[in-house]
Image (tube, helix red, strand yellow):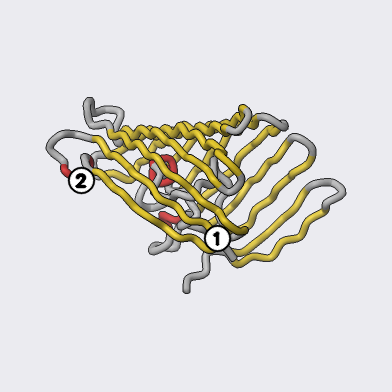
Amino acid sequence: AENFEAYVKYADPTHGWYVKGGKFYLPFGWRLQDQTAFVRQVTGISMTSPDQGVELGYDRGNWSVQLAFTNGAANAQSGSGNQVTGQLIYTLARWRAGLAASHTKADAGNRNVLGVFAGLRTGPVAWLGEADLVSDDGYPEGRRRLVSLLGEADWRLAKGHNLKLTAEYYDPDRNISEDQQARYSALYEFTPIPFLQLRAGYRRYRGIPQNDTQNRHLTFIELHGFF
């Protein structure tokens, strides 16, 4: 077993603010179930990469704000540097929109990430989108700029039945042309009882022709239990 979160939290529900410290997930963009999504891999912020530090937050009415001061995943081995991550979200009944940013100071090279994300509910379909821009100084040739995009539709066919369609885009270096990658997915999710889900899906990867890893098909079945 591996522990991903362990923290203490003090909150003031009357005024909507809180503070927590320990090991926790960083506040940035959509918390997707698929941690291999381009937007989660490119930003380096996902539910498989928690960090240690302190987070301040405010959640009241339509506004939600989080600001985290942590060690930074890039400093896990060296122990030097730090990371600041934050996001601002505005939520209404049918839609929400958010802005997120992160700055990592590390001996291997500083890293800045900027993201925007939004969601819209239209009847039984929920639409999600996220766009992230990364500026990373940790490459041998120097600074590299990366871009990742996500578009997702979740269609609630019936109670406990969801059809998920996603389209993703990834540019690993804005200075190099024709190196972009894409990923398309179709998943069926069945949740017969709370905290138990069966997922089956098909995924198509597309990239540069000479790279077989970037051009492949994937079919999978997963069983998830949530505790």
Q: What residue is rendered at 60% in x and 29% in y?
A: 120
Above or below: residue 21 compared with residue 26: below
Residue type at the position of mark 1 = Leu
The residue under label 1 is 196
Neighbour tally class for label 2: few under 14, some 14-19, many 20 plus, Cα within 10 Å: few
Q: What residue is rendered at 23% in x and 41% in y?
A: 214
Q: Nearer the viewer, residue 26 or 126?
A: 126
Neighbour tally class for label 1: few under 14, some 14-19, many 20 plus, Cα within 10 Å: few
Q: Please indicate whether residue 108 sits to the left or right of residue 47 in the image.
A: left
Do the numbered discs 2 and 1 sit on residues whose CB atoms are within 8 Å? Answer: no
Q: Which is nearer the N-term, disc 2 or disc 1? A: 1
Above or below: residue 126 compared with residue 191: above
Above or below: residue 110 compared with residue 22: above
Q: Residue most toward the left?
A: 210
Q: Nearer the viewer, residue 82 or 35?
A: 35
Q: What residue is rendered at 82% in x and 53% in y?
A: 12
Residue 192, by quadrant, is bottom right
Q: Nearer the viewer, residue 108 or 11?
A: 11
Residue type at the position of mark 2 = Thr
Q: Secondary structure at mark 2?
A: helix
The residue under label 2 is 213
Tell me residue 156's x, y (percent).
Answer: 57, 39
Nearer to us of marks 2 and 1 is: 1
Tell me residue 126's x, y (percent).
Answer: 57, 33
Quarter occupied by the C terminus: bottom right
- Residue 209 tag number: none
Q: Nearer the viewer, residue 109 or 98?
A: 98
* CA gap, disc 2 and disc 1: 32 Å
Q: Please indicate whether residue 31 sits to the left or right of residue 138 in the image.
A: right
